[in-house]
Amino acid sequence: MTQSILPGPSLTAAGEDQPLVRLRGVTRTVRLPDNEELHILGGVDLDVRQGDHISIVGRSGSGKSTLLNILGMLDLPTTGTIEFDGVPVESMRGNQRAVLRGAAVGFIFQQFNLLAERTALENVMTPLLYAKGRAFWRREKLAAEMLERVGLGNRLQEKPQRLSGGEQQRVAIARALVRGPQLILADEPTGALDIVTGQSVMALLAEVAGESGAALITITHDPNVAALAHRHYLLDRGHLRTGAEVPA
C-alpha cells in the first residue's frame, strides 16, 4: 500500500461526537455608509466533521463568501457562536486565531492568488515559512512532494504565467494542503476553469482531502461542482438550509 505523503493535522483530531467546526445562530450584520444596517447572515447553524465534503450553493449576494470568512476565522459573527475543535473562536485573541487559521485551515480561491514572480515550488513552500519544527526545515521537500501528488512534479520551477489555468489551480491546491489542514475552504474553485478541467480539479481536490481526512467545504454557484459533495446546502438570503439547487 502506498503511504500518503500528506503531513498529519496540526491539532488533535476532533472526537467522533464533537464536530470539528460548530456554528450556532451565526449572524453577520454590517453598517453601511448611510448608517443603515445590512443583514448578511441570519441565524446559521452548521456542524462540520472531519472527512465531511460539503457544498454550499447560492446566488450572488446570498452571503456565501461571508459565511466562508467566518468558517475560516477571518471574520467573527455579529451574534451567535463558532467553535473550532470544541474551542470558542470568539474567546481567542486575534493572533491566536491567526495561528490556528494558518495551521488548521487551507484556502483555495477562484483566482488562484499565486505569487507571479515565484515558481510553483516557491508558491507551495510559502505557508511552510510560518511552520515550526520539522515542517519548516523540510519545507522544500514537502512542497515538492505535494506538487508531485497533484501531478506537477515536472513543473516545480515554472512561474504561474507559464502554467495553464488548470495547472495554476493545482498549485493553489498544493499550497492549501501542504500544511495538512483539518479544514479546506474552496471559494468558487473552478470558476476560472473550463468544465472538463474544473471537474478534474475538483476530483483531485476531493481525493487528496479524503486521504488526509480533512473536511472540505466548497462554496459554489455551479450545481455540477456541488453534486460532487456528500452533503448539500443552499444559502438563500442569509439562511442556510438543506438543498443543492440555486434558486432562480
Image (cartoon, rainbow, N blue to C red):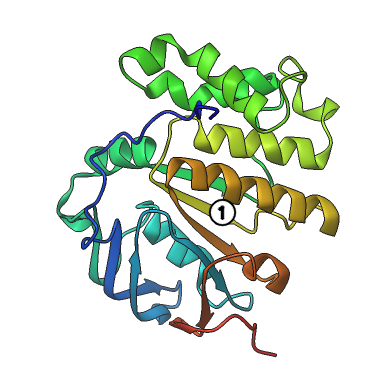
Q: Whole-percent x and y of residue 81?
A: 22, 68
Residue drawn at (32%, 39%) of the image: 98
**Residue 36's quadrant in the figure?**
bottom left
Quadrant where the C terminus is found in the figure? bottom right
**Residue 69's quadrant in the figure?**
bottom left
Q: Whole-percent x and y of residue 118?
A: 67, 19
- In this view, 248 is above or below 235: below
Residue designated by label 1: 186
Q: Whole-percent x and y of residue 231?
A: 50, 71
**Whether residue 192 is visible:** no
- In this view, 97 is above or below 247: above
Left/right placement of residue 242 relative to residue 43 reads right
How packed mark 1 is, by other alpha carbons closer than 10 Å (few <14, some 14-19, many 20 or more), is many
Residue drawn at (47%, 27%) of the image: 127
Q: Amino acid at mark 1?
A: Ala
- In-front residue for pair 94/23: 23
Q: Secondary structure at mark 1?
A: strand
Q: How many marks?
A: 1
Q: Whole-percent x and y of residue 195?
A: 83, 59
- In-front residue for pair 87/7: 7
Determine the residue located farthest toward the top in the rendered image.
137
Residue drawn at (24%, 58%) of the image: 16
Residue drawn at (48%, 15%) of the image: 139
